[in-house]
């Protein structure tokens, strides 16, 4: 029996070597010699190295059959370690799967270990081929879009894996694909660091990526960087993409992100949905309903800056958005296109370089950083409130009609005992150019936040970007006899915009909170941001004849202690709901009239 099992393994090893050689000869490609300064390393040399390593793997398997007990266990560990160092070939797995598996089960105990190692090898080979196919696919997309990419890499016979990225979506789904190029004012190393750190990536694209988390991939995907030396970092990403309105559901994705160094000064960050890797349980912490086909960013050094090709390629539910005022934006591929991602990145980089234009109060040398961090938190809180599904651990939805009313269930503010924090929000269309609506709001937002002021508030701080597309201001209330504003000494506001979206977000602040801001910067719990999000209604951007406005207003309302447990009833909510509706309708009336 030992001779039989040994002969079977030798026969299997011989067949595998022939298959690998045959696949390689069939998979040779003729590519452009000038693609991205292609390296001169011979594919034939790579193949010979792979074949040699794989024969070494089978030799270790044969040796393990000649021992038992502790020695067999040691050899098994040697096999597992040896697998991680193999250079996995690019041949399609279907040619070799049936022949790599042993046709019969040998009686030796460590034969199962050999099968397990070969199974891991095949899974890793397949995962590596899918990863390479995704990389080649984004290079092909960049080539077809007439960017600075002039060819595609020769990666062996992976056409079968590329083909699955070109299949038609299933019924009820559609593919959205877009490409955008730009030169961004950030060094390539810094840009790569931002994109590969999911927290920083989510913060940079916070207007698009509502939620982002990451963890190391599980199973064979952990070994991809060892199987392919061009992969320098891997991370599994869970993310939600949103529009600033409760009328459009978020898009949930789980995808693998790989950083590849192509040649000197050129990198590719490749995203591909976890669904394409069939082995092991899903890594997603979300109820994923969308697929991220091969997407990513190709980066080339441009002096001190980065020249980027941004590629978005997703498969989404065609009927996810019910017919409403945002349907045309979502269906036109403008909502989450590559151009919007690049525009958001550029806006964030300009914002980070803002400088003081007005400073009429003593501040710490870290005041600039404190203000940028605080207003960024305000924007995130605003976007969380207007999300289609707000965080239920923080907000309770009391009314979800034309005007949505939320109740803060955390109640963690010492100074607000005896009151409850509410938010009311709504979205509507205005038949007016977006820029005129923004200008009106900039002039009137302080009046709307501080009604009945007898004296004009004093601007004590102004922090703005070079192009003034991002402006942070702090206004001081000098009308201390006004009952409505006597507890609100300051109003912090940020106005920012690009060609896709405009935000005006503000929050009242007390003197104590303002003092704390410029001492340590940690006053987040005291902020209650309200604001506006304005989207052009159409592809003409700033020149569109109409726009879509989302308003969210946050306010504390006093509640008697005996009524605290009854506040969720409709009768108890009549007063706050009426107040919210009146203010919101008045704001909408002002805008339409303008």
Image (cartoon, grey):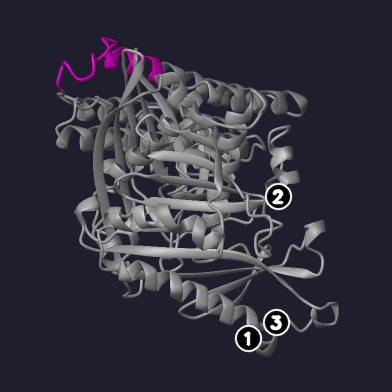
The picture quadrant where one finds residue 564 is bottom right
Residue at position x 73%, y 32% in the image: 519
What residue did someone put label 3 on?
A: 568
What residue did someone put label 1 on?
A: 574
> Horizontal placement of 571 versus 193: left or right?
right
Q: Report the magenta residues as a range.
A: 32-51
Residue at position x 49%, y 26% in the image: 193
C-alpha distance separating marks 2 and 1: 29 Å
Considering the image in quadrants, where does the N terminus appear? top right
Q: Nearer the viewer, mark 3 or mark 1?
A: 1
The picture places residue 205, in percent across and down from the top left corner, at 45, 42
The picture quadrant where one finds residue 76 is top right
Question: Which secondary structure, mark 3?
Answer: loop
The picture quadrant where one finds residue 550 is bottom left
Spot the residue most to the bottom. 571
What residue did someone put label 2 on?
A: 510
**Dot 1 alpha-carbon crowd within 10 angstroms: few under 14, some 14 to 19, many 20 or more:** few
Question: Which secondary structure, mark 2?
Answer: loop
The picture places residue 183, in percent across and down from the top left corner, at 29, 26
> Horizontal placement of 184 versus 404: left or right?
left
Q: Is residue 214 one of those drawn in magenta?
A: no
């Amino acid at each position: 029996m030992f001779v039989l099992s040994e002969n079977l393994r030798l026969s299997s090893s011989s067949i595998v070597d022939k298959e690998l050689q045959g696949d390689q000869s069939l998979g040779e490609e003729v590519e452009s010699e000038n693609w991205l300064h292609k390296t001169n390393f011979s594919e034939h040399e790579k193949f010979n190295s792979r074949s040699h390593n794989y024969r070494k793997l089978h030799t270790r398997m044969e040796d393990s059959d000649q021992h038992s007990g502790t020695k067999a266990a040691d050899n098994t560990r040697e096999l597992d370690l040896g697998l991680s160092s193999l250079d996995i070939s690019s041949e399609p797995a279907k040619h070799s799967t049936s022949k790599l598996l042993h046709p019969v089960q040998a009686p030796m105990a460590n034969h199962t270990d050999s099968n397990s190692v070969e199974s891991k090898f095949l899974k890793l080979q397949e995962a590596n081929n899918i990863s390479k196919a995704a990389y080649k696919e984004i290079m092909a997309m960049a080539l077809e879009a007439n960017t600075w990419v002039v060819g595609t890499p020769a990666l062996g016979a992976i056409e079968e894996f590329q083909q699955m990225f070109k299949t038609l979506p299933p019924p009820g789904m559609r593919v959205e694909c877009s490409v955008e190029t730009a030169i961004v004012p950030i060094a390539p190393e810094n840009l790569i660091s931002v994109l590969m750190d999911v927290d920083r990536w989510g913060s940079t694209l916070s207007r698009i990526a509502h939620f982002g988390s990451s963890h190391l991939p599980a199973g064979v995907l952990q070994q991809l960087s060892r199987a392919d030396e061009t992969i320098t970092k891997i991370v599994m990403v869970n993310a939600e993409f949103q529009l600033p309105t409760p009328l459009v559901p978020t898009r949930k994705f789980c995808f693998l992100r790989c950083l590849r160094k192509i040649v000197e000064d050129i990198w590719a960050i490749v995203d591909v949905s976890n669904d394409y890797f069939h082995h092991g349980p899903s890594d997603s912490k979300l109820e994923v309903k969308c697929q991220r086909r091969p997407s990513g960013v190709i980066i080339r050094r441009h002096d001190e800056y980065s020249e980027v090709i941004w590629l978005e390629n997703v498969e989404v539910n065609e009927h996810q958005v019910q017919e409403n005022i945002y349907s045309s934006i979502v269906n036109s591929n403008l909502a989450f296109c590559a151009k919007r991602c690049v525009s958001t990145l550029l806006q964030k980089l300009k914002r980070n370089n803002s400088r003081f234009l007005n400073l009429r109060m003593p501040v710490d040398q870290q005041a600039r950083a404190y203000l940028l961090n605080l207003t960024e938190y305000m924007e995130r809180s605003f976007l969380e409130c207007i999300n289609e599904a707000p965080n239920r651990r923080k907000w309770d939805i009391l009314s979800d009609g034309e005007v949505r009313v939320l109740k803060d269930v955390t109640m963690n503010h010492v100074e607000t005992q005896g009151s409850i924090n509410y938010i009311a929000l709504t979205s509507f269309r205005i038949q007016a150019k977006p820029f005129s609506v923004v200008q009106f709001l900039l002039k009137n937002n302080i009046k709307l936040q501080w009604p009945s002021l007898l004296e004009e508030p004093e601007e004590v701080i102004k922090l703005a970007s070079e192009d003034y597309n991002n402006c942070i201001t702090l206004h001081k209330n000098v009308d201390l006899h006004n009952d409505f504003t006597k507890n609100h000494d300051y109003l912090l506001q940020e106005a920012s915009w690009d060609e896709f979206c405009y935000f005006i977000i503000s929050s009242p602040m007390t003197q104590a909170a303002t003092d704390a801001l410029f001492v340590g910067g940690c006053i987040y719990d005291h902020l209650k941001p309200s604001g506006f999000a304005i989207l052009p209604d159409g592809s003409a951007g700033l020149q569109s004849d109409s726009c879509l406005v989302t308003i969210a207003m946050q306010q504390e309302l006093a509640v008697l202690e005996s009524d605290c447990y009854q506040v969720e009833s409709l009768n108890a909510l009549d007063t706050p709901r009426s107040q919210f509706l009146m203010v919101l309708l008045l704001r909408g009336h002002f805008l339409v009239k303008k």
